[in-house]
Image (tube, helix red, strand yellow):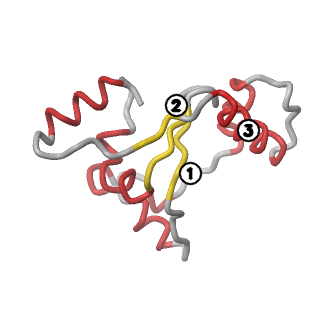
Amino acid sequence: MEKIKIDNFSKEYPRCHFPEFTSLDKDNCTAIYEKISKKLGLATTSDGLALVRTIDARQKTCPTAEGIGDQFSFTSLLTTYGLKGADNVYVNWYRYDRIDKLKFSDLDKYFLDIWYRA
């Protein structure tokens, strides 16, 4: 997690601690990268940018999530489709070489405070 996000969170919520997270080491990042690459039919020898581009090319807009803004909630979005979030989520920050693990409930609650370009 970028330090500036933690600092900005502390300024916004002075009486609240930044949500607990774990930054994955290189081996765990590589394992996630390889697992996703395999599921998408990519050679695991391709780089992280190739994986990002492949996911970007295959993504589809979720109409119920458009224009939600400050009211965005992953829990609500998943519920709309009869799904439930896992206890933990993995957030890729770059090219599958910087991944953080955090509670789904924390990402849902503080999404706009965590997911932005720093």
The 10 Å Cα crowd at callout 1, few under 14, some 14 to 19, many 20 or more, is few
- Which residue is the site of mark 1? 61
Percent position (x, y) of residue 48? Answer: 70, 26
Q: CA distance from mark 1 to mark 3?
A: 27 Å
Task: Tell me which numbered mark, 3 or 2, is placed earlier along the sequence.
Answer: 3
Residue depth check, mark 1 versus mark 2: number of the one nearer the observer: 2
CA gap, disc 3 to disc 2? 16 Å
Q: Residues within 10 Å of mark 2 (few under 14, many from 20)?
A: some
Disc 2 target residue = 93
Is 60 placed left or right of 22 in the picture? right
Q: Identify the image quadrant of residue 8.
A: top left
Q: Are marks 3 and 2 in contact (CB under 8 Å)?
A: no
The residue pinned by badge 3 equals 31
Q: Residue at x 72, y 32 (%)?
A: 30
Amino acid tagged 2: Trp
Amino acid on which the number 1 mark rests in the picture: Thr
